[in-house]
Amino acid sequence: MGGTNRCILLRSRPDGMPSGENFELVEEGVPEPGEGELVVQTIYLSVDPYMRGRMTGVRTYISPFETGKVLTGGVVGKVVESRNPDFKEGEIVTGNLSWADYSLSDGKHLRKLDPESAPISTSLGIVGMPGLTAYFGLLDIGKPKPGETVVISGAAGAVGTVAGQIAKLYGCKVVGIAGSKEKTSYLKKELGFDAVINYQREEISKAVKLHAAEGVDIYFDNVGGPISDSVMRRINYKARIILCGQISQYNLKEPEKGPRVQGQLIQRSALMQGFIVSDYADRQEEGIKQLGQWVRDGKLKYRENMVEGLENAPQAFIGLFNGENLGKQLVKVSEE
Amino acid sequence: MGGTNRCILLRSRPDGMPSGENFELVEEGVPEPGEGELVVQTIYLSVDPYMRGRMTGVRTYISPFETGKVLTGGVVGKVVESRNPDFKEGEIVTGNLSWADYSLSDGKHLRKLDPESAPISTSLGIVGMPGLTAYFGLLDIGKPKPGETVVISGAAGAVGTVAGQIAKLYGCKVVGIAGSKEKTSYLKKELGFDAVINYQREEISKAVKLHAAEGVDIYFDNVGGPISDSVMRRINYKARIILCGQISQYNLKEPEKGPRVQGQLIQRSALMQGFIVSDYADRQEEGIKQLGQWVRDGKLKYRENMVEGLENAPQAFIGLFNGENLGKQLVKVSEE
């Protein structure tokens, strides 16, 4: 089909906080599909905190990004050319694709979306990876029971907003920790959190003691660091600590030491469990169905923070670490 | 019945490592049982690391010892006088009783022992609290599968020796960490551990990498601190870290900071769970039956480290923190 394809490469690995210099926008030709392949035009691009780990060059649960290569992430797009019998032009799909105007795909791991059933952008947020992360982490690890106290850090983010709302659906008392008045107001007034803590203005230890007066039964942790240290001091017998993210640690040049948690876990017979959403790959359908149903029933609300233009994807990504997003951070690359 | 009863009091709370000055031996009269009560003459007294926590004066899962009061712990003894219809003179019982020649009891929480079925001292060790701790921790939290690698710290202690042998019964590769040649030889030659690490002589990180070459699936942690830091760096996907004790931390005057474990747990989708044996109170009978059977079948071996004389109980207790015991540390107070 010809034309220009803008792509964003990882130019260099961030040392500490990522900056614009770690990224580079280059132009190349729009890819031509071979037999069995298709071309997807990016509509929305997702930026997610976990991507910081892939930029570090250390193999963890997922292979690192390579410098000089195009970044990849969650994309919703439209099939614009197809030589794969399973996909037709005009269909809307989601998958892990390039930070680019156009991606080449063999169709494996692409999922078709029905624009009638939900806004297609939600497949990158509340009915996508972040929503599923909240769903499986909270329910499978946290096992919330009515009346329990659930504390959520990074509560205004794409995962935290969903985790908190599901905890409310399960009859829990929900305390959200976030970093601005706008965020805490949203959590309390729009999402129905029982209490909120603004860690920029309040002394966390005191605030946790005040708002989780009966102690913490479940801690859904997106941030780690000193905020978590304060929450850990208030855990109850048989508490469950769901380790979802540690965003406070991702940009440290040297790993930070902290209070050892083991003694506290023994004293409270408590569980701390790390996970990533792909641990639940075989239950993805269940999660998507349930989340979609809750959204359609008005039981789960969501907000998207939309940045316009592929060229602004690096700044949108960096903004995740400055607490700029309320809800799911997306980049709009082309019109639906 | 009259006579003298020697008792050991907590004279003062240890500040750091306990010393003889924290204890005091006093003499009083042998207690007289009231209606429904009985008097037990101590035969064996158990000293256990968890007691250090009770000496600190901070309420955790168990109330602190009070200064000026007689210490209590696991005891095996003989009923020498009874005004309780459920107990006869001459019966052998075990329970949480005084650090004294004689204890008064209302019979609640006392368990009768059959001296024919097993040596009575084992009810304080392999078929008692430490054995049950190993049994429930390893099986319920660790869920060992054949071929998995299990690393055990404090491997030559009362809990570690049992945990390692059960892991072998479940078909695991077992690596034990202990602090002397005598201990590591015992683990390897007598208990059949696959590999041993002497942390006094070897660089732990290297040794763990060498002996747990396929990574660590289960870590049964009795010690915490730098030894655990090294093991944590080698955990596998979906590893289980069983937090049983943190003996390296119990005598620190200031809590020690360490590497934050949360990132590692997320990267490996790993679980870390604290527990104490009383979490499994409702399954105690099952555990005692199974452990007793394994001992009778020769599948579990055990060793006891016996100190003679009630007056030496404080030194036996202090010795736990110097790594003096191989197997279960007991104090023999009177003849069987």
Image (cartoon, coloured by chain):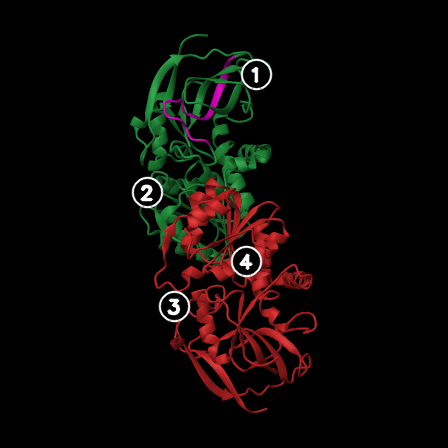
Chain colours: A red, B green
What residue is pinned by disc 3? A17
Please name whichever residue, B107 or B149, is drawn nearer the observer in this view of the structure: B107
Tell me the CA gap for discs 2 and 3. 33 Å
Question: Quick check: marks 2 and 3 in contact, CB under 8 Å?
Answer: no
Q: Secondary structure at mark 3?
A: loop
What residue is pinned by disc 4? A187
Q: Secondary structure at mark 1?
A: loop
Question: Quick check: marks 4 and 2 in contact, CB under 8 Å?
Answer: no
Q: Three-letter amino acid code at disc 4? A: Leu
Residue depth check, mark 1 versus mark 2: number of the one nearer the observer:
2
Q: Position of residue B291 (x, y in %)?
A: 55, 35
Q: Which residues are magenta?
A: B63-81
Please name whichever residue, B121 or B33, is drawn nearer the observer in this view of the structure: B33
What residue is pinned by disc 1? B87
Q: Three-letter amino acid code at disc 1? A: Phe
Residue depth check, mark 3 versus mark 1: number of the one nearer the observer:
3
| Image quadrant in which the C terminus of chain A is located | bottom right
Q: Chain of mark 3?
A: A
Relative to residue B321, is residue B170 drawn left or right?
A: right
| Image quadrant in which the N terminus of chain A is located | bottom right
- Looking at the rendering, which quadrant does residue A190 occupy? bottom right
What residue is pinned by disc 2? B254
Q: Residue drawn 47% across and 55% down?
A: B265
Q: Position of residue A238 (x, y in %)?
A: 53, 43
Q: Was residue A226 drawn as part of the magenta stretch in this picture?
A: no
Relative to residue A329, is residue A251 drawn left or right?
A: left
Tell me the CA gap for discs 3 and 1. 70 Å
Q: Three-letter amino acid code at disc 3? A: Met
- In this view, A36 is above or below A140: below
Residue depth check, mark 2 versus mark 3: number of the one nearer the observer:
3
